[in-house]
Image: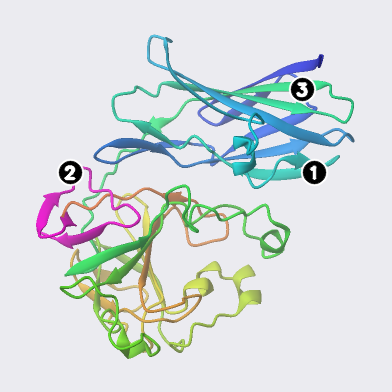
Amino acid sequence: MRTVYYIAFLLFFFGIPIYAQNKILIDSKPSTIFIEQSDTKQILNFDFLLSNQSTDTLTLERIKVLVFDNQNHLIHTKFLDNNGTAPSILLLPTRNWNGKESHLVFNPFSEFDNSLTLAKLEFEWIFSDPKENETIVKTIIIPKKYQQKINYKLPLKGRVLVYDAHDYNSHHRRFDYNFEPIKLLDLKSNFMRYAYDFVILDSSNNQFKNNGENNSDYFGFGNLVYAVADGKIIYATGDHKDDKNFNIPKLKENPLELYGNCIAIEHKDGSISIYGHLKENSLKCKKGDLVKAGQEIAQIGVSGSSFFPHLHFEIRTDITNVAEGLPSYFSNINLVIGETFQKVKSGLAESGNIIETK
């Protein structure tokens, strides 16, 4: 039977860690953890940076989360462990930590029913070493509901596919800034944590005509893009070719190079909206311009790191390499279900949804 090697308690109160011991350090990323609200569920989009401070190789055997309400009552629990012929713990991309090694772990318990009050989440991590000694680490997360201060309108008109948003499986969500090639570019956070890829559809929900080999086959190529709210243009570039290419080394000095032709608008609350992969020479504004909500600012293209014509949209804190993503809700979207329409009360657009502006 395994013995408990030691127990360390790590407290995260609004992102401030307190360490009882330091064999394994766990830090929540970002420091402030928001609860994102959909019509049916609550979503916690954050990461853990786990650092093995010892020289031992440690294997993660189990993760468990306990959810408590405002009266500190246990109301919900979930876990991943190494039981079964296909153990659930293998859903995590990283399970082993070598000595003096750090890995980013995306929070695997990211969705909860709207009926639950997420006042406190206690995570328990169990590691084993080669001698089968156990290390138990506990972390406490105090999330808070995101309060959007500005009314955002969807930046497109017509029928739109949320091709990829920021759910647990999304590539926006799975940006590992602790991965060494990313660290070499001096990128220190997930600026696309709450990003969207929007694709224009025709009335039959097709993305393109013919075989989709040409940019012009896509119904969205050249479609107008609109400012989601009033603000000031703080970044604008429109001379990149619509050739799906970008300069990787340039990301170190300008992370917005990833998006090719791109516009950044700063809003009155300090948040910044990003519009990426815009069409070459389509920008209708320049740095320093003041724009109004719903104003035409550019067209959809396929510049930068883009597989096909679409609009990359996100809200973030900054345009530098330390920017973090912020949630965004749209006040004017309906969910398209066959021939029916359903108002999205929360304003959250989710991966796979087909939506229209109302």
Mark 2 surroundings: few (<14), some (14-19) or many (≥20) residues within 10 A: some
Name the kind of residue labelled 3 in the image.
Thr
Disc number placed over residue 345 in the picture, else none: 2
Q: Earlier in the sequence, mark 1 or mark 3?
A: 1
**CA distance for labels 3 and 2:** 44 Å
Residue contact at pointers 2 and 1, CB within 8 angstroms: no
Give the residue displayed 40% in from the left and 88% down from the top.
213
- Give left or right: position of 91 versus 271: right
The question of residue 329 being in magenta is answered with no
**CA distance for labels 2 and 1:** 44 Å
**CA distance for labels 1 and 3:** 16 Å
Mark 3 surroundings: few (<14), some (14-19) or many (≥20) residues within 10 A: many
**Nearer to me, 212 or 53:** 212
Give the residue displayed 83% in from the left and 42% down from the top.
98
Q: Label 3's element?
A: strand
Q: Which residue is mark 1?
A: 101
Span colored in magenta: 334-358
- Give left or right: position of 65 versus 238: right
Name the kind of residue labelled 2 in the image.
Lys
**Nearer to me, 244 or 128:** 128
Q: Which residue is mark 3?
A: 135
Residue contact at pointers 3 and 2, CB within 8 angstroms: no
Image coordinates of residue 124 in percent, x first then y, are 62, 23
Q: Label 2's element?
A: loop
Image coordinates of residue 146 in percent, x first then y, are 34, 38
Tag in front: 1 or 3: 3
Disc number placed over residue 283 in the picture, else none: none
Q: Label 1's element?
A: loop
